[in-house]
Amino acid sequence: MSITTKRILLPAALILLSTPAWADDPAQPFGFGTTPTADELARFSSPLPDGRGLPAGSGSVGDGKVVYEEQCQACHGQNLEGGIGDRLIGGRGTLVNDDATKKPIKTVESYWPYATTLFDYIKRSMPFTAPDSLSNDQVYAVTAYVLSEAKIVPADATLDAKTLAAVQMPNRDGFIPDPRPDIFPSVADSPHQELKLIANPE
């Protein structure tokens, strides 16, 4: 056996000897993590633009103002003008213009095409210091407040899964469908399927 071969085989043997016992257990392929409980899954939501996936609950603009002042104002400003956090309202009509000196202002009001995205973002990420700490009712309320300040919903609005999905955002038609999936092969004909067959020949 050559010296080069020994140099290759010795590290390989050490790796095999150090492989943990759980590596052979198909029930625990990575050796960490747990199966989520029903209570943990109940906290998870992933709403689609048409409202599917929105949780139960509701919140009014008035209640949202209170939550905003307590949980959001320090970062996003008293008038939603931004600060540490992003500006939330204003900027309509600034995304497309012929003046190079006018910077586009991307806000919930001027840019976001779906109101359900606002709920989803607040639910998952806000407040910054304690994400996912707000109840569903509080998230609906803050969403209602932001949309009201942006003059998208009335000042007396109360939002829930049905009414939030029905909100028409100002820039809803500012997006065009992505045509690229139309030219991609089907899943059955994709290269990933061929790689799968190579990796798992039967």
Image (tube, rainbow, N blue to C red):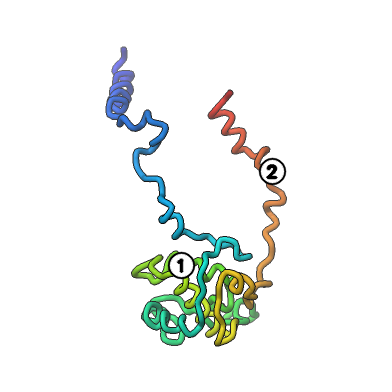
Image point (28%, 29%), residue name: 18
- To which quarter of the image does residue 15 belong? top left
In the visual, does 193 lie left or right of 36?
Answer: right
Extreme top residue here? 1
Is residue 21 depicted above or below 173 in this figure?
above
Looking at the rendered structure, the secondary structure element under dot 2 is loop
Looking at the rendered structure, the secondary structure element under dot 1 is helix
- To which quarter of the image does residue 177 belong? bottom right
- To which quarter of the image does residue 53 belong? bottom right
The answer to whether one can see residue 44 in this image is yes
User: Observer-nearest residue: 114 or 137?
Assistant: 137
Q: Nearer the viewer, mark 2 or mark 1?
A: 1
Q: Give the numbered dot on residue 185.
A: 2
Is residue 190 depicted above or below 61 in this figure?
above
User: Observer-nearest residue: 154 or 191?
Assistant: 154
The answer to whether one can see residue 113 in this image is no
Is residue 23 depicted above or below 93 in this figure?
above
Q: Which amino acid is tagged 2?
A: Pro
Q: Quadrant of the N terminus?
A: top left
Q: Residues within 10 Å of mark 2 (few under 14, many from 20)?
A: few
Q: Earlier in the sequence, mark 2 or mark 1?
A: 1
Where's residue 38, x and y in %?
43, 52
Image point (58%, 23%), residue name: 202
In the visual, does 98 lie left or right of 81?
Answer: right
Which residue, given by chain and number where applicable, does mark 1 sit on? 123
* Cα distance in 3D space between marks 2 and 1: 35 Å
Give the total number of marks visible in the rendering.
Answer: 2
